[in-house]
Image (cartoon, rainbow, N blue to C red):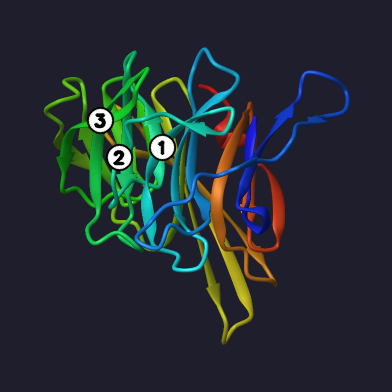
Amino acid sequence: MWVGIDGETAIRKLTLTGAVPTVGPLRTLPRGGPSNEPTQIVGMQAIPGSADAVIATLRGATSQVRVGTYVLDDGSPRTDVLAAPSPSSFALGPPGIIFGSADGLDAPNSAIYTMTLSSGGLSTVKTTGFLGGGIRRDGGLLFSSAGEVIDVSSPASPFKAGQLLPLQSLNTSIAVLGRRRLLVVQSDWHGQLGIGRISLSVFETSGFKEIASGFLLFKVPPLVSEIFYLGGDALVALTANGLVLIHAPFLLPP
């Protein structure tokens, strides 16, 4: 596993095969942008079959403007770089294909990218103006945290296949549960009431129908930035106040 270290404008490898993680050396990220400034990680995706290669979108450490998407081999960039605006969320496609999503926060437009991966780096096959957000792939479908369902069975010709129920929160994360099910987690903070809420919804990935739901209330802001399904009835939510372990019986496989 590779992690970004913003304060050091670097990444480092954590090896998790033993009882105690082994921490690797810092690998300084390539400089970029008009002023050739130090960079930080915006989003990162491991490359199957390699313990040392990752795809990473970088932004200037000072300007906070995206400078491009790189393939890094033990921290060293390959030649072919996808220029900004560039994706912040990734999903693996068929061999040699990577899907990416730009969220519109510091990119001019939200978009879904279809990219090819080679020994030289990355190149773009298609850029399509969907809403973007965090993305997850299940078979020939790509699900976005904006609620869109995109058919990517033909990677070079994606099209909108459907829509989940209207999502009510900007803080939305998604995870594939398996068995043709998708988990959508939304979080909100109601400051006047002093109540935070994490809502969980399970959808069928075939008909996009909601089949189960539940929620949790908090006295601190529980704004969720990412979720990780652990299997069974368990998931971990990464929030502004730390990790939250959630057990929900309706997550169990049918």
Amino acid type, callout 2: Leu
Q: From the image, which quarter does the N terminus lie in?
A: top right
- State how far apart marks 1 and 2 are (Cα): 7 Å
Q: Position of residue 164 (x, y in %)?
A: 28, 45
> Do tag 1 and tag 2 residues touch (Cβ < 8 Å)?
yes
Residue 216, position as x, y percentages in the image = 62, 57
Q: Residues within 10 Å of mark 2 (few under 14, many from 20)?
A: some
Q: Residues within 10 Å of mark 1 (few under 14, many from 20)?
A: many
Which residue is tagged 1?
A: 70
Q: Residue, x 59% and y 38% (percent of image)?
A: 228
Q: CA distance from mark 3 to mark 1?
A: 10 Å
Foreground of the two, 240 or 148: 240
Q: Residues within 10 Å of mark 3 (few under 14, many from 20)?
A: some
In this view, the residue in front, 245 or 142, is 142
Q: Which residue is labeled 3 in the image? A: 123
Expressed as whole percent of the image width and height from the top left, the position of residue 220 reads 68, 71
Residue 82: image tag: 2
Question: Is residue 228 at all visible to an observer of this figure?
Answer: yes
Mark 2 or mark 3, which has the lower sequence index? 2
Report, in whole angstroms, how far the alpha carbon at label 2 lies from the one at label 3: 6 Å
Q: Is residue 218 left or right of residue 188?
A: right
> Of the residues under marks 1 and 2, which one precedes in the sequence?
1
Q: Secondary structure at mark 3?
A: strand
> Which secondary structure, mark 2?
loop
Q: Are marks 3 and 1 in contact (CB under 8 Å)?
A: no
Q: Residue type at mark 1: give it.
A: Tyr
Which callout, 3 or 1, points at the residue further toward the start of the chain? 1
Amino acid residing under circle 3: Ser
Q: Position of residue 174 (x, y in %)?
A: 45, 42
What residue appears at the point 59 percent right and 28 percent down from the top-left corner? 74
